[in-house]
Image: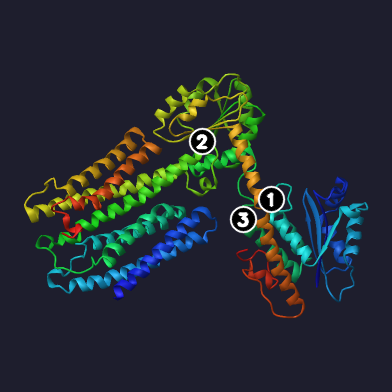
């Protein structure tokens, strides 16, 4: 039994049309072609940043090696890929898959979506009956490694966008945002982006106040928020927890005096002000009040940059962990191929090892 | 001898638990905080076993029978250690804030170290008969009730410390990883308040019990003895904290500073006053 891999990703420089052609073929079709060609097990990972084909060559089956696999992928992609297509086998292929699930191979270092994408790819192959003993264990293991790396290193620590940093900070102040309401001042593009992100954090209520009431109402309707007249927003400062400002005003619209008056009515409950406007919407001195936390676009961007740098620093540790589990897996593979009884440490789920349901156990 | 061995085992476990609490402060990985909890629980069990043996030895003297042996600095510190670790285990079990270990356990560790030092190293462990004034059922109630309140105040102090750090993190505009590991401002603030709201009535009841006992033993409720005075000051400071939080909305730093003043008074009442108090001087082994 040997594992083979052929694939392209965002780094390999293959023409975009190839990824499109492969995506257009559809995973079931590709899986069918791979099985027809004689490979006993096959999984296809297809996302907007990568298309990878993993197959298993069994001793007795009449199937090819890496070059045959590459030819088939090129045939499906509709062009000769040459060095754009990476080919790996054995432990190298395992290592590559583990790097992928660890987020080390992603465009955004350590991002989490890839875990779900690999899981979906594996489940699709499983449903099509294209997986077998090796791929079942390999992909369970890969997902386990992905989680392990994220848990034990800082490869996916910290947020990488201004709005997600803002949400994370709000959670550091209020805990869950489920009972917090948010006021957005302004109805521009930035306000819309922020509204979308805050809603995904499931805030209890969203208010939008804009100088031109109509525009505020349009945006509010889009997000099932409540539009507020501009004159009325100071009153809301007493009850909302987060205020995000993004108006085009040239003078501050939120003064220290307004915030101070609101704080007296808040009985000491914290207030989080996020000013992403240029020029600034909130008087700087407002942030000096007790229980008031003021972050500007520059502050948030600074945190994003720092988080990015922190993740880069974790590459070495993450890679080392991936290498270690690869070695362990390769050892298991050799032992199993030699007919020895072998087991993996901390295996993610026992059910897959017996070739039953995938994701049945605590994987 | 067994009593000492058991206590040493407990102290070692408390130390290890405290160290794990600090490791968890800097290291993600839930196993640190889980083991902190387990070690602490086993430590409490050993400590209880050790205290059980001590109790048996104490009761060997007829007039001591069925009174708790906290008539010495050693005994009081040992009980205090148990109270802090016990309340921490309850708070931690309910709120699952492993990160608080680093802020609360040092107090338990200090108390344990004090117990070991004052008791086992300096020979403060010899057992005497209780003074006649202490031979009252109040002996089993009044000091223990007060100690439970002190232990909860100690937990609240740890929570307050975490709150100050979290606030500083958020104000810095460059929060470090610690900020994301600590509970939120509002959670810490509420927990600090709730712990004090529980401990305050216990302390008040404890002081009133002391008054009743004083009436039975010395014929007056209140005599402005140093311990009495300072416990009253402690209660007043915490009363101010609770009042200002509920009525004037004192939160965050200002509130924490107030509650910390209260805890400073707790420490002074518990330890410092023993050296100036005439009537509560038993702890200084007079």
x then y, percent, for residue B268: 25, 48
Residue B266 appears in the figure: yes
Mark 1 is surrounded, within 10 Å at the Cα level, by few (under 14), some (14 to 19) or many (20 or more) other residues, namely: few
Report in which chain the residue with disc 1 lies. Answer: A
Position of A225 with respect to A33 (left or right) is left
Q: Residue furthest left?
A: B219
Q: Which residue is mark 1?
A: A113
State the CA–CA distance, disc 3 to disc 1.
17 Å
Disc 3 vs disc 2: which is toward the camera? 3
Q: Which residue is mark 2?
A: A181
Mark 2 is surrounded, within 10 Å at the Cα level, by few (under 14), some (14 to 19) or many (20 or more) other residues, namely: some
Q: Are marks 3 and 1 in contact (CB under 8 Å)?
A: no
Q: Which residue is mark 3?
A: A153
Q: Identify the mark nearer the N-term, 3 or 1.
A: 1
Q: Closer to the camera, A182 or B265?
A: B265
Q: Say whether mark 2 and mark 1 are on the same chain.
A: yes
x then y, percent, for residue B82: 32, 61
Q: Secondary structure at mark 3?
A: loop
Tell me what residue is drawn at x 68 percent, y 65 percent. A324
Q: Are marks 1 and 2 in contact (CB under 8 Å)?
A: no
x then y, percent, for residue B244: 31, 36
Q: Are marks 3 and 2 in contact (CB under 8 Å)?
A: no
Asked if A101 appears above or below A15 in the picture, the reply is below
State the CA–CA distance, disc 1 to disc 2.
28 Å
x then y, percent, for residue A125: 77, 62
């Amino acid at each position: 039994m040997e594992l083979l891999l052929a694939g392209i990703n965002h780094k390999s420089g293959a023409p975009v049309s190839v990824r499109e052609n492969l995506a257009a073929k559809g995973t079931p079709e590709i899986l069918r072609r791979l099985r027809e060609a004689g490979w006993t097990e096959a999984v296809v990972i297809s996302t907007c940043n990568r298309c990878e084909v993993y197959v298993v060559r069994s001793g007795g089956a009449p199937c090819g090696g890496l070059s045959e696999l590459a030819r088939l992928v090129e045939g499906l992609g509709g062009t000769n890929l040459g060095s754009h297509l990476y080919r790996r086998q054995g432990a190298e292929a395992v290592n590559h898959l583990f790097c992928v699930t660890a987020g080390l191979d992603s465009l955004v270092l350590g991002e989490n979506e890839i875990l779900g994408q690999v899981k979906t790819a594996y489940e699709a192959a499983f449903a099509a009956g294209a997986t077998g003993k090796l791929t079942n264990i390999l992909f369970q293991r890969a997902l386990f490694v992905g989680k392990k790396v994220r848990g034990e290193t800082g490869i996916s620590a910290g947020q990488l966008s201004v709005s997600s940093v803002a949400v994370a900070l709000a959670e550091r102040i209020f805990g869950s945002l489920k009972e917090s309401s948010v006021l957005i001042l302004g109805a521009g593009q930035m306000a819309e982006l922020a509204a979308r992100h805050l809603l995904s954090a499931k805030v209890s209520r969203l208010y939008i106040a804009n100088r031109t009431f109509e525009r505020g109402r349009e945006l509010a309707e889009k997000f099932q928020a409540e539009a507020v007249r501009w004159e009325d927003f100071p009153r809301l400062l007493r009850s909302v927890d987060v205020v995000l400002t993004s108006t085009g005003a040239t003078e501050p619209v939120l003064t220290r005096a307004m915030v101070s008056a609101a704080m007296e009515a808040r009985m000491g409950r914290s207030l989080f002000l996020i000013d992403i406007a240029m020029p600034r919407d909130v008087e700087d001195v407002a942030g000096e009040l007790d229980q008031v936390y003021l972050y500007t676009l520059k502050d948030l961007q600074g945190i994003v940059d720092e988080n990015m740098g922190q993740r880069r620093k974790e590459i070495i540790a993450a890679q080392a962990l991936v290498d270690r589990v690869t070695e362990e897996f390769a050892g298991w593979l050799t032992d199993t191929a030699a007919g020895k009884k072998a087991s993996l440490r901390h295996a993610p789920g026992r059910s897959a090892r017996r070739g039953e349901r995938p994701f049945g156990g605590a994987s | 001898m067994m009593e000492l061995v058991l206590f040493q085992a407990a102290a070692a476990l408390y130390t290890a638990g405290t160290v794990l609490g600090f490791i968890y402060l800097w290291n993600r990985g839930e196993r640190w905080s889980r083991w902190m909890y387990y070690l602490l629980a086993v430590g409490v069990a050993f400590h209880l076993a050790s205290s059980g043996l001590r109790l048996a030895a104490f009761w060997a003297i007829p007039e001591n029978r069925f009174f708790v042996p906290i008539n010495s600095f050693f005994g009081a510190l040992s009980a205090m250690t148990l109270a802090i670790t016990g309340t921490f285990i309850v708070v931690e079990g309910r709120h699952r804030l492993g990160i608080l270990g680093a802020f609360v356990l040092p107090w338990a560790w200090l108390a344990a170290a004090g117990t070991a030092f004052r008791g086992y190293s300096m020979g403060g462990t010899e057992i005497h008969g209780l003074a006649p004034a202490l031979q009252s059922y109040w002996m089993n109630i009044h000091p223990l009730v007060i100690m439970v309140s002190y232990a909860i105040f100690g937990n609240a102090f740890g929570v307050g410390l975490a709150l100050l750090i979290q606030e500083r993190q958020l104000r810095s505009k460059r929060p470090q990883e610690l900020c994301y590991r600590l509970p939120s401002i509002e959670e810490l603030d509420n927990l600090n308040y709730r712990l004090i709201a529980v401990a305050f009535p216990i302390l008040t009841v404890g002081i009133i019990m002391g008054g009743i006992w004083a009436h039975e033993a010395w014929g007056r409720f209140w005599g402005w003895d140093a311990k009495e005075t300072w416990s009253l000051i402690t209660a007043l400071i915490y009363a101010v904290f609770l009042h200002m939080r509920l009525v004037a909305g004192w939160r965050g730093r200002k509130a924490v500073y107030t509650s910390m003043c209260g805890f400073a008074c707790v420490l002074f009442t518990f330890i410092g006053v023993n050296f100036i108090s005439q009537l509560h001087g038993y702890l200084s082994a007079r």
